[in-house]
Image (cartoon, rainbow, N blue to C red):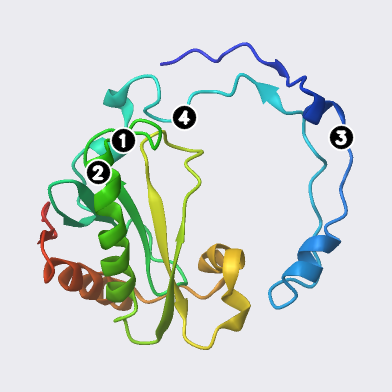
Amino acid sequence: MTESLAQHPADTAFHARLPIGERLDATPLTEGLPWAFEQITMRPLEPMLVPEQPRGGELDPEDCGSCRPSEHTIWQDDLWQVRAGWDIGGLPFVGAISPREHWLLEDAPHEVLAAYGPLMQRISQAVKSIPGVARCHFARWNDGSAHLHLWALARPAGMMQGRGAALAFWDEMLPKMPQEMGEDHIRIVAEALAAGGGEAFPKR
């Protein structure tokens, strides 16, 4: 168990100007994404403490979930893996994409990063082969785990409220798909990826 780091409020010039403790106006969100939001109430701005607590696998790769074998790995090749199905949500497909070895974005070998471009194209094509899907969105945050990982999210056809950054929120709000439908969508993506190389469902 890693002990918590002693933290203090960040004291850069940028941080010093922020209204910590105040509730900020969220109008820019409702105006910037009017197709998704009508009203938003933000929590008061919390103190920004540093140093940040280590992310999963940041201090010890042995603690990294992305490095362990998983029944949720739906496809892999020598360098990359795609996982999905740990929870069936409201979007047609949500998948996590990560290198098989423990790399951060900052230290990943160029050959690993170079392989991601063609894979991204293949994932987009595979996700869009799901009935009722118009687009495949990609996102990266990496705040929970240090292991480089990205997300693929399927936007339903005709769902203009899901454009842009708002799509990720809809997975929790749309009615959950039946388990059978979610598994069928995962199979479609896995088999489409394997048709271009790599292996579908290697841990099953």
Quarter of the view holding residue 163:
bottom right
In the image, is 60 to the left or to the right of 13? left
CB within 8 Å, label 4 to label 3? no
Side of 50 where 11 appears, left or right: right
The x and y percentages for residue 96 are: 35, 54
Tell me the kind of residue under disc 1: Ala
Quick check: 139 above or below 159?
above
Q: Reading the chain from its start, which is encountered first: label 2 or label 4?
A: 4
Q: CA distance from mark 4 to mark 3?
A: 25 Å
Q: In the rendered structure, find residue 55 and report the number of the disc placed on it.
A: 4
Which residue was labeled with disc 2? 112
Q: Residue at x 51, y 38 (%)?
A: 143
Q: Which residue occupies 31% across, 34% down?
A: 103
Residue bearing the label numbered 1: 108
Q: Which residue is mark 3?
A: 21
Mark 1 Cα shell of 10 Å, populated few (<14), some (14-19), many (≥20): some
In the image, taking residue 34 as reference, residue 120 lies left or right, namely left
Assign a secondary structure to mark 1: loop
User: Residue at coordinates 59% horizontally, 63% vertically from top-left?
Assistant: 165
> Which label sits in the foreground, 4 or 1?
1
